[in-house]
Image (tube, rainbow, N blue to C red):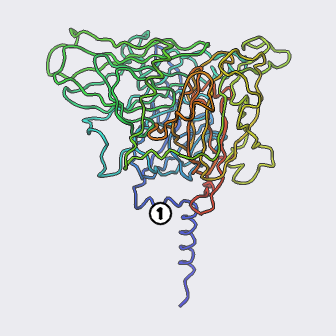
Amino acid sequence: MGTSPAIVMILFVAVGCFVAYPEAVTAKHTGITRHYTFNIKLKNTTRLCHTKSIVTVNGKFPGPRVITREGDRLVVKVVNHVPNNISIHWHGVRQLRSGWADGPSYITQCPVQTGHSYVYNFTITGQRGTLFWHAHISWLRATVYGPLIILPRRNESYPFVKPYKEVPILFGEWFNADPEAVINQSLQTGGGPNVSDAYTFNGLPGPLYNCSAKDTYKLKVKPGKTYLLRLINAALNDELFFSIAGHSLTVVEADAVYVKPFETNVLMITSGQTTNVLLKTKPKAPNATFLMLARPYATGMGTFDNTTVAGILEYETPSSSLKNRPLLKPGLPAINATNFVANFTSKFRSLATAKFPANVPQKVDKKFFFTVGLGTKPCPKNQTCQGPTNTTKFAAAMNNISFALPRTALLQSHFFSQYSKGVYTTDFPAFPLIPFNYTGTPPNNTLVNNGTKLVVIPFNTSVELVLQDTSILGAESHPLHLHGYNFYVVGQGFGNFDPENDPPKFNLVDPVERNTVVVPSGGWVAIRFQADNPGVWLMHCHFDVHQSWGLGMAWMVLDGELPNQKLPPPPSDLPKC
């Protein structure tokens, strides 16, 4: 008996869907599909008695919560109603074989232009915890960001006490000026950009700023309860200390990976990192109100926003006036407390249990050494610049290569083999071309080279990468974020990395697993990861000013030999440049 054309067509479409979206079949067994719509809109918003039009998602600042579970598929339609180009990055999501949904403009996609839309379609695989989403073009991240909360699978519990309530707290920055104008002016003059006017908790600056008492974040708690605070540093250019007066916090997760719990009164969270903490409230409601504060940890020589955001932790009580309660204030480390930061960072360890193993590569196929830091570019002819000298502009680089964004998305160029068109080259240096005393007296020549250079590695290569800060234009810590991967932080230290004596001290048992790591000021950090995700993946400093100056590069991970190791073709609505 013959097969009808209709059945043949249905089979053809089904097979085609499986090839393009293999996760769609498996998702039925592991989770559900959750749909969101992000309307990119302008919204008049007032902070610090200053009203301006800002770019938002669905008119919200910060943007809406995206809540999902491990194993679920997310389908997010982004519709652009503003004059700016836009793209959304799902920060920390592994994007296994779904690189088209990663979101960095001109890396995995061209931006979504005015009046157009794009559907981000991906599955949360093997992750649970707190991440966030944000715009990934120019400085639109200043107002376009929100929490991405990944709950455990149904009927699975946390490896810590079940909290009474879960509360996301996003650290942000507020600019009275248009952040796009701020960075555009900086790039034009070659000088450092103007700093923000305030820090915020969930978009609110709090009472320590002018005209902001009414815009104060308040966390109301009940006595004798455990709260899970999902802390997200979405600030553009700052690492922040955080503390709550009269309360200690237990760290249980970092970058959506569970960690061995440890207690602390003060946290440092760098731009791009998330940290989940348990807050255990006092058994009885105290006769006091408690400030929660965040202020910067700053190591560079440039200017920064040296202000403090305050929120209020308030116990719910049936009676008694709040006005008579004393307001207690926490202590925070000094602005440049580098030793505190190093000690705090060293406390993070993977759970390394049977259920949550630390699969750190024990053997390494390829080793890389990247210097990370600032430098200069020549000022254009017949122009005076405001960089370190009036003939130079500020720049930033890895291995002295300042990353130039292409005009066509790199992943698209790679997938359709447009390499010959000169979009990128594959000669990013694995080691500095000219070694020097990286943390000693800086060299006289601070000029960087420009290029869109990639490192190409075969599928499933095990990688060890040492990131070394430099003292060129001053030592400074840098939060490095790797797209498409988590990595293990196997070692760190101050001074120059010693390839003979430092590797034997690496932690290959329970190193912390992250997506964003701080390269210490005047020091180095070593990471390892398994390149098991084909595509083109950006790695960059999460200070937007440094990224704008070129502090980034990209890894091209080739397809594997098996069908489930290959990158599927792009969706039909992938934005055009």
Residue 543 at x, y = what percent?
A: 58, 26
Image side of residue 2 versus residue 397, left or right: left
Q: Name the image quarter holding residue 110.
A: top right
Task: Please indicate whether residue 313 sits to the left or right of residue 574 in the image.
Answer: left
Residue 262 x %, y %? 34, 30
- For mark 1, does the 10 Å Cα neighbourhood hold few (<14), some (14 to 19), or many (20 or more) residues? few
The one of 346 and 533 positioned closer to us in this rendering: 346
Q: Position of residue 17 (x, y in %)?
A: 55, 64
State whether residue 320 appears in this view.
yes
493 relative to 413, above or below? above
**Residue at figure coordinates x 35%, y 51% from the top left:** 153
Residue ID for mark 1: 25
Residue 274: x %, y % from top left:
44, 32
Name the quadrant containing residue 424: top right
- Taking the view exactly as shown, the residue that stands out farthest to the bottom is 1
Q: Amino acid at mark 1?
A: Val
In this rendering, position of residue 501 left or right of residue 279: right
Q: Is residue 563 above or below residue 280?
A: below
Residue 577 visible here: no
Quadrant where the C terminus is found in the figure: top right
Most extreme residue toward the left is 319
Disc tally is 1
Give 247 or 188, whichever is nearer the viewer.
247
Secondary element at image label 1: helix
Picture quarter containing residue 164?
top left
Residue at the far right in the pictured view:
382
